[in-house]
Amino acid sequence: MQKQDYHKAVERVLLVIFFLNLAVVIAKVIAGVLANSLTVISDAVHSTIDMVNNVVGVMVIRYASSPPDKEHPYGHGKFETLGAYSISGFLFITCFELIWRAINHLFFDKESQPEISALTVVVITATVLINICVTKYEEYKGRELSSELLIADATHTKSDIYVSISVLASFVFVYFGYTIADAIFALFIAVLIAYSGYSLFQQTVPILVDAVGIEAQKIEQIALSTPGVVSCSNIRSRGKPGDLFIEMVVKVKTGSLKDAHEVTEAIELKLREEFGRADITIHFEP
């Protein structure tokens, strides 16, 4: 798939997810206001971040699809990684907001009590089912397109499922009179969100700082398996699967420049078959 087609495909997925998240946010806000529930309102805030991330994702993916230019000779692919990184930042902001609201409810606003109804339970249950479908769809398309942004966004949406399930669990305690559970479960939600943010940091930071994209040994094995290659050295790689940059020096056993080019082309073909889209630079020595 060409990069332009790839970015258009990712953008279509993000737009579908945006409208589904919009429906989820509207439903949760209505349910939260009617029930006067901190956990439901917090859940709605979390889902709003999902929706905002979709908008950011569309903007990022459009810019990431731009061809290389004078200021960005290696292209704009890292803007997609930067978008995934920003999602983790939104997660930590959400985490802080939930902790503040929960502490306020536990120590300063004890008179505010949630009123859980059948409608509230039905709405939250429905949003859980929608988010499960969204997560499965986004993970599938993310793997199919090798899109780090879609996989990261699916991770965020998956945390929304856990949040909504914990909201349903808090309803049980509130029903039996333990209204303090509303704030306690909100704190639990904050921990889940913080963990999701930390996971995204782990995935995106290595790419942003140009950590090794593919182990040098794997690249060397592929190069040495190509007929005519004597040795392989100075191997460097960065990026992510589907958007890799690979450099190396190979010694080739050949008597002509044409044959040497054919050997390097064979190496490039094998590398792309193994790792997907890649910008490969091979210097050869006779």
Image: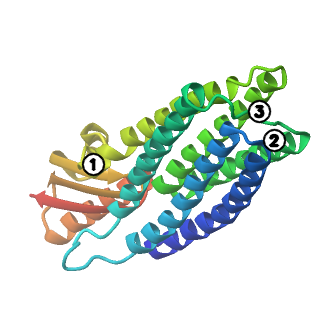
85, 251: nearer the viewer? 85
* Residue for badge 3: 168
Identify the element where label 3 is drawn: helix
Going 36% across and 57% down the picture, which residue do you hit?
Answer: 82
| Proximity of marks 2 and 3: CB atoms separated by less than 8 Å | yes
Cα distance between the residues tagged 3 and 1:
55 Å
Can residue 54 be seen in the rendering of this structure? yes
36, 195: nearer the viewer? 36
Q: Residues within 10 Å of mark 3 (few under 14, many from 20)?
A: many
Residue 276, image quadrant: bottom left
Looking at the image, residue 165 sits to the left or right of residue 232; the answer is right
Amino acid carrying mark 3 in the image: Leu
Q: On screen, 79 above or below 234?
A: below
* Residue for badge 2: 125
Amino acid carrying mark 2 in the image: Thr
Going 18% across and 53% down the picture, which residue do you hit?
Answer: 248
The spot of residue 200 in percent (x, y) is 43, 42
* Residue for badge 1: 223
Q: Quadrant of the C terminus?
A: bottom left
Amino acid carrying mark 1 in the image: Ala
The spot of residue 158 in percent (x, y) is 62, 42
